[in-house]
Amino acid sequence: MLQRIQTVYMFLAAVLSIVCLCLQIGTFSAAGVPVLREFNLWMTDPLGDHHYSTWPLFAVLVLSSAIGLCNIFLFQNRKMQARICLFNMLLVLGWYILFAVFSQTLGNVADMIDLTFRPEIAAALPCVSTILYLMARHAILADEKLVRAADRIR
């Protein structure tokens, strides 16, 4: 049944991940002047050239979004739905690990001595989607518990 609350949670989590794919997630600056803008798929230098060194961030978030959207339609198998929600939470955790690694290593590679990194607000959207996946998983498990209780009564 697609009208359950966990469907709304999973849909919102997938939408937030897709929105994060489209927005800037960080800025590298030297002496307060922005030098590189980091997106999920590329980095843009001041000349406007794109460097596709951050493509793994894009791949992990696309995979999480696609699995999250497909998970909505697995409503007949609640145990699998709960496992996939947990898997998506782990994927988003992996995205944050990759984000931290790229923020540290790309800042050191840029041949600038005083390069600082500032994350943008869009980098928090996957965290919100993780909370939504957690809420969906909780609702799925509550549904499963309710169905088992109804089966015992019969």
Image: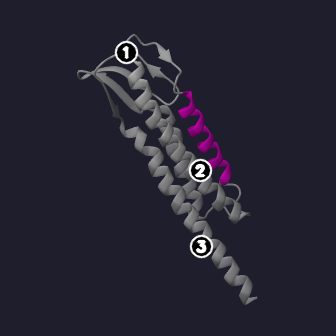
Say whether marks 3 and 1 touch (CB < 8 Å): no
Q: Residue 65 versus residue 119: which sits nearer the camera?
A: 119
Is 111 covered by the magenta stretch?
no
In space, the residues marked 2 and 3 are separated at their CA atoms by 19 Å
Labels 2 and 3: the sequence-earlier one: 2
Three-letter amino acid code of the residue under disc 1? Asp
State the image coordinates of residue 82 (x, y, percent, origin top left).
Answer: 64, 61
Can residue 103 be seen by looking at this rendering? Answer: yes
State the image coordinates of residue 5 (x, y, percent, origin top left).
Answer: 56, 64
Labels 3 and 1: the sequence-earlier one: 1
User: Pointer 2: what residue?
Assistant: 88
Q: What residue lies at 51% left-to-right and 35% top-to-bottom?
A: 21
Three-letter amino acid code of the residue under disc 3? Ala
Around disc 2, counting alpha carbons within 10 Å, would you say few (fewer than 14), some (14 to 19), or many (20 or more)? many
State the image coordinates of residue 119 (x, y, percent, origin top left).
Answer: 36, 35
The secondary structure making up most of the magenta span is helix
User: Pointer 1: what residue?
Assistant: 111
In the rendered structure, the answer to whether residue 23 lies left or right of residue 69 reads left
Name the residue at the left extreme.
Answer: 31
- For the C terminus, which image quadrant? bottom right
Observer-side mark, 2 or 3, equals 2
